[in-house]
Structure formats: C-alpha cells, structure tokens
Image: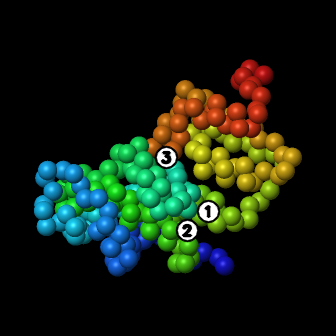
Amino acid sequence: DEAQGVDNDRAYRLADEALADPKVVSEVRAAPAPESDKLIPEFRHAPYVSREVGSAVASVLTKVRECAPFAFREERGLAVAQIEDVMAQYDLLPEEGLERHGWSASRIATVALHAVRAAAEFKDRRFDFADMLFLPLVNGWCYPRFDLIVQDEAQDCSLPMFMFVRNMLKAHGRIAMVGDEMQAIYSFRGADSAAMGRIGEQLGATPLPLNI
C-alpha cells in the first residue's frame, strides 16, 4: 500500500498516543522516579503529564529512529537502556522541570519505546523525515538494486544511512564513497568523525586520494 503523505507532526502525535495508553501509563509508574531532591512527592508514583512531556518524548522518538532504529526490537529492559543511552548522547535527558513532575530518563524512554514501536507498525500510512530511513530498514522493504553506488559526503554517514546504502547494492556491486573526515558536521544526526574509517573497514575498501 502507498503511504498517504507527509505528516510533520507524526512524532508529536505518536508521543501523545503513547502517553494516553493505559498500558504505557502502568509501565511508566513502575519505572524508577527521578532521584532529584526537587521532585514533588505526589508525582513520584504518578508523574504529571504536560505538553512538555509530549514534546520531550517526540524528540527522543525522532532521535531513536535516526540513530538507533533497531533498539525497539530488544528485550524491554535493554531497549529502554539503549534509548536512555541515545538520550544521554544527544542531550535529551529530562530537564529539571520534568524531573520535578516525576519524569526520569527511564520513564521518558519507556514512553518513547512504545512510540517507536507504533511508528514502525506504520498503521497510519503517514511518514515524516526520520521515517525515510527508519521504515524501510526496520520493515525490510524492497529496495532498487544497483551495480554501482556513489555516495558523497560519506564522513556524515550514520550507521542507518550506511545500512540503507548497502541494501541498495547488488550482490557483486561496488560502492564509491567520497568524503573528508575533517569535515564531519552531522554528529547530531548520528554521524561521527570515525565514519570514513569504519565504512572502509566494513567494505574492505581501498582508500584513494583526491589526486588520483
């Protein structure tokens, strides 16, 4: 089936739906409360849901789809831990205001895990920018196959992006990846300065200078 169209608010909608799910609410209450001494006592076991909570979950949902698309398939505890790692790496840990109202990183990650699962199911047939890599990867969708793929700016290639490119290569095809590790600027999207070396090792590639 074809997708219905772009939904720029998809992350927020999925976050809100997860926060309204009684099963998710039960899991959130069972998750550890913040250790902060500023936590309002009445929210230790029943955290207060606000628009800021939905926004925080939506941000984590987007980053997980971009940088750790398969985390949701792990056992629940491990999946939540991986999402917390993403939150820490990309400065998405809950701020003091959320912690005061009972929202620890574990509780945010618990909601985000359910939202990621819902995003992968794709029942609404709508997508946003993060879904362009996430949905084909996690659902094993068919790819066009090529004998030769040339990728520019390879220093900014995240692991999901690299997996996507590999999936489009024919069995005995070749990849030419062009990049400069000194120009890596997309760390916020999952790229890292070691991407060129990592890709070269995985491909068994031959490095070629620009003056060939």
- In this view of the protein, which residue sits in the foreground, 143 or 28? 28
Q: Point out the tag, 1 or 2, that comes first from the N-terminus.
A: 2
What residue is shown at x 13% (from left), y 62% (from top)? 41
Contact (Cβ within 8 Å) of mark 3 with mark 1: no
The answer to whether residue 16 shows anywhere in this view is no
Q: Is mark 2 on a helix, strand or loop?
A: helix
Decide: few, some or many residues near mark 2? Use Cα within 10 Å; few <14, some 14-19, many ≥20: many
Q: Point out the tag, 2 or 3, that comes first from the N-terminus.
A: 2
The answer to whether residue 14 shows anywhere in this view is yes
Decide: few, some or many residues near mark 1? Use Cα within 10 Å; few <14, some 14-19, many ≥20: some
- In this view of the protein, which residue sits in the foreground, 124 or 116? 116
Q: Which amino acid does label 1 sit on?
A: Val
Contact (Cβ within 8 Å) of mark 1 with mark 2: yes
Q: Name the residue under label 2.
A: 120
Q: Which amino acid does label 3 sit on?
A: Arg
Colour pattern: rainbow
Q: Mark 1 points at which residue?
A: 138
Q: Distance between the residues labelled 2 and 3?
A: 19 Å
